[in-house]
Image (cartoon, rainbow, N blue to C red):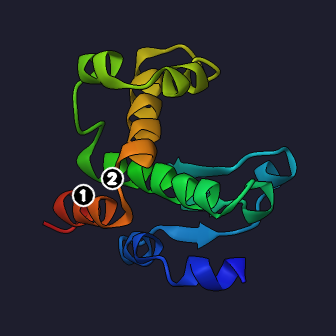
C-alpha cells in the first residue's frame, strides 16, 4: 500500500520529470535513514526509505524534504536566505538540523528542507519544482 501511495505522489512524479532517479531501497535505509538526495557528476538520486517511517505523515514529510533538495539543486542553492531560516525555523527543525555537519551550506540547505517539509504542502513543493527546474 505504501508504494501505491508513493506512486500517486505528484511531488515524486514531478521530481522524476527533472531526470532525478527515485529509489525506495538503498544502503542508507539499512542504517536508519528516512531518505536522502545525492547529486554529483555521476548520479542524481532521491531515496525514500518507507520502512523507516513512523506513519504516512512522516513518509510524506520525508518526500517533501528530499524534493526540496531537488529544488535547491535546480536553483543552484537554497531558495531563501540563511537568516530567514534562523529567525523562522521551529525549535524542532533547529534541533534536527543540529545533528548535521556544522558547515553553513549544509545547515542552510537542511534548515530549508526541514522547514519546507514542515510548512509546505505537496502542491507548493510541486510549484517550486516547476519554478526552479522547468522555467
Few, some or many C-alpha atoms within 10 Å of disc 2 (few <14, some 14-19, many ≥20)? many
Q: Earlier in the sequence, mark 1 or mark 2?
A: 2
96 to the left or right of 19: right
Name the residue at 37% across, 77% down: 17
Is disc 1 placed on a helix, strand or loop? helix
**Tag 1 near tag 2, CB within 8 Å:** yes
Q: Is residue 26 above or below residue 18?
A: above
Residue 100: mark: none
**Residue found at the far right of this picture:** 30
**Residue 43 showing in the rendered view:** no
13 to the left or right of 74: right
Residue 47, position as x, y percentages in the image: 63, 60
Residue 71: mark: 2
Residue 58, position as x, y percentages in the image: 62, 53
Name the residue at 43% across, 78% down: 13
Name the residue at 34% across, 16% down: 86
Q: Is residue 90 above or below residue 50?
A: above
Depth order, front residue of 91/101: 91
* Occupied quadrant, residue 16: bottom left
7 to the left or right of 20: right
Residue 69, position as x, y percentages in the image: 43, 48
* Occupied quadrant, residue 100: top right
Q: Is residue 2 above or below residue 46?
A: below
**Residue found at the far left of this picture:** 135
Depth order, front residue of 57/18: 57
In the picture, which quadrant includes the C terminus?
A: bottom left
Is disc 2 placed on a helix, strand or loop? helix
Q: Which residue is mark 1?
A: 128
Is label 1 or label 2 in front? 1
Few, some or many C-alpha atoms within 10 Å of disc 1 (few <14, some 14-19, many ≥20)? some
5 to the left or right of 55: left
Name the residue at 26% across, 16% down: 83
Amino acid at each position: 500500500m505504501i508504494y501505491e501511495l508513493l506512486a500517486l505522489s505528484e511531488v515524486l512524479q514531478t521530481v522524476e520529470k527533472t531526470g532525478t532517479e527515485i529509489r525506495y531501497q538503498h544502503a542508507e535505509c539499512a542504517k536508519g535513514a528516512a531518505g536522502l538526495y545525492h547529486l554529483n557528476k555521476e548520479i542524481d538520486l532521491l531515496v525514500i526509505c518507507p520502512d523507516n517511517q513512523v506513519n504516512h505523515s512522516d513518509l510524506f514529510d520525508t518526500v517533501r524534504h528530499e524534493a526540496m533538495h531537488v529544488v535547491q539543486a535546480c536553483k543552484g542553492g537554497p531558495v531563501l536566505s540563511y537568516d530567514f531560516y534562523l529567525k523562522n525555523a521551529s525549535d524542532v527543525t533547529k534541533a534536527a538540523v543540529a545533528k548535521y555537519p556544522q558547515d553553513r551550506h549544509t545547515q542552510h540547505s537542511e534548515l530549508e528542507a526541514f522547514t519546507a517539509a514542515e510548512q509546505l504542502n505537496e502542491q507548493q513543493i510541486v510549484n517550486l519544482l516547476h519554478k526552479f527546474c522547468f522555467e
